[in-house]
Image (cartoon, rainbow, N blue to C red):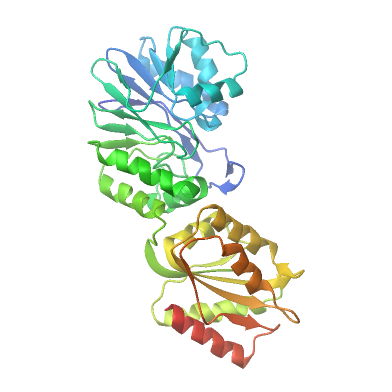
Amino acid sequence: MSEKNFVYVGVNDREIDLFEGMYDVPNGMAYNSYVIRGEKTAVMDTVDGRFVEKWLDNVADALDGKAADYLIVQHMEPDHSAGIEAFAKKYPDAKIVGNTKTFAMLGEYFDGLDLEGRKVVVKEGDSLDLGGHKLRFVFAPMVHWPEVMFTFDESAGVLYSADAFGKFGAKGTDEDWACEARRYYFGIVGKYGVQVQSVLKKAAALDIKTICPLHGEILTDNLGYYVGLYDTWSAYKPEAEGVTIAYTSVYGHTAEAVMLLKAELEKTGVKVPLFDLARCDMSEAVEDAFKYGKIVLATTTYNGEIFPFMRTFISALVERGYKNRTVAFIENGTWAPMAQKVMRGMLEGCKELKFAENNVTLHAAMKDGDKSAIKALAEELK
């Protein structure tokens, strides 16, 4: 796909089922790469190892007989860096552009690759003039690896944003951008909100007309919408009003309680996404836990602890810096309920959480008094 200022040379992966071995990607993944053609040519990143040959063909087509002068490495994660060695061999006169951390990692992945005389080590704010395209490097450490940098084409207003503004799904997939970008953000980048906020401040000083991420779609219209969502997500602010319910249930009694709570909340017009953690795509549950401002965690006491799927879910929230939310609990325990204590203890390190007052304790099957308690919780959360 050609654009005025660059040529897309990435690939779609429709063979993959789990991205990074854990994220369900029913619509595949895109590994994006670009060629900038000025008086000199620069290739922006490579692709996953399974597609390097196809990518090299795409690059050759884009160069149209010209030599490649530079390969700019913005991110060393293997789904974007696997083609570096093959590129270096095919284009022996091309320079490899990165920062000091880039080249330290490169040596770890490509033992014995000799780039003597071919390295261009850049620092924050350095520029590279291709003749017609002046590229400026904007460092984005821990978004989401330490070596990450963005590249801004000052001449064309194009921001090459590494993994930022990326999404799950192959390029060209007809789906809502925000849904899969949000799931990608909180799954992959979400722990590093402070670092994202920092690089957004740098980006605010740039006259950006197009955003080219390493996954998903090229963004050209309504950029304020995408940047605004990233600002909300990285500031850990709720994006919408609603109550997420995440639960596990062994014999159906806890499930009965959460269904009643959901019904009571929906009577008042509250949005209530519901997740059975033993059966759902947990990354979607994590996504909605951050999307909405309130959450109910409901589970059974299990071996004096909590059900394993709930432990995994709460751990995922804690790892990603969960905060600025209201949290309520429903626990079930026939003789020694411990779930609420354990769940709250897991969340103690999270900042700016408000805990509900009308938490619910079930003793085995739900009784009339429990129904009244659930209605009281719904009243508090609505």
What residue lies at 44% left-to-right and 36% top-to-bottom?
141
Instruction: Estimate the x, y position of residue 170 in percent, counting from the top left.
Output: 46, 40
Using the image as rendered, state which of residue 204 and residue 259 is in the foreground.
Answer: 204
Vertical placement of residue 268 versus 67, above or below: below
313 on left or right of 251: left
Q: Looking at the picture, how far across and down is residue 315, in whole percent?
A: 60, 57
What residue is rendered at 51% in x and 26% in y? Answer: 81
Q: Is residue 39 left or right of residue 267?
A: left
Specify whether residue 192 is in view.
yes
Image height of 291 relative to 372, above or below:
above
Q: Which quadrant: the C terminus?
A: bottom left
In the image shown, does 346 or 132 lie closer to the viewer? 346
Residue 76 vertical placement versus 93 (above, below): below
Q: Farthest residue to the bottom: give it.
A: 368
Residue 147, percent from left and from top: 47, 31
Q: Quadrant of residue 136?
A: top left
Query: Is any atom of residue 176 visible in this view?
Result: no
Q: Quadrant of residue 203?
A: top left
Using the image as rendered, state which of residue 262 and residue 298 is in the foreground. Answer: 298
